[in-house]
Amino acid sequence: MRVIDEVLKQIEEHKHSRSSEVLAGAVLSACGLPCQAFTLLSASTRLDDHGKTLVSELLSIAQQPDFSNADQDAAIVKITELMPHLMK
């Protein structure tokens, strides 16, 4: 899925930033997993306009033209590798 790929790319480039934690939490939430790293307040205060646009797209993930459960599963695995502390 394009939106997940774009978020994962940004996380990989800036994996130690707090905004990447928020984006990772947003992806996990969009994949059906609760994550304390993502709240609307954290998105509002830690993300730039591009990050907020990505979160907005994740809000309608099931309506994305390239929606895929397999891509969601792969995103969970990738985030677990990049940010294992979010999975605790």
Image (tube, rainbow, N blue to C red):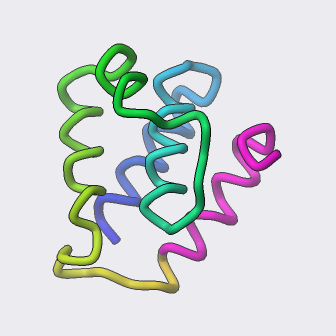
- Give the tally of numbered discs: 0
Instruction: Tell me the residue at 34%/14% (across/down).
Output: 45
Q: Is residue 83 magenta?
A: yes
Instruction: Tell me the residue at 48%/50% (across/down).
Output: 8
The part of the chain drawn in magenta is 72-88
Indicate the quadrant where residue 80 lies: bottom right
From the top left corner, tell me how far across and down residue 58 is, in percent. Answer: 30, 56
Instruction: Tell me the residue at 30%/59% (across/down).
Output: 3
Taking 14 as reference, is 53 left or right?
Answer: left
Taking 77 as reference, is 27 left or right?
Answer: left
Relative height, residue 48 to residue 39 (above, below): above
Q: Is residue 54 magenta?
A: no
Front-lying residue, 88 or 75: 88
Relative height, residue 77 to residue 24 (above, below): below
From the top left corner, tell me how far across and down residue 1 is, in percent. Answer: 34, 71
Relative height, residue 64 to residue 79 (above, below): below
What secondary structure characterizes most of the magenta part?
Answer: helix
Front-lying residue, 78 or 52: 52
Front-lying residue, 66 or 13: 66
Instruction: Tell me the residue at 55%/20% (across/down).
Output: 18
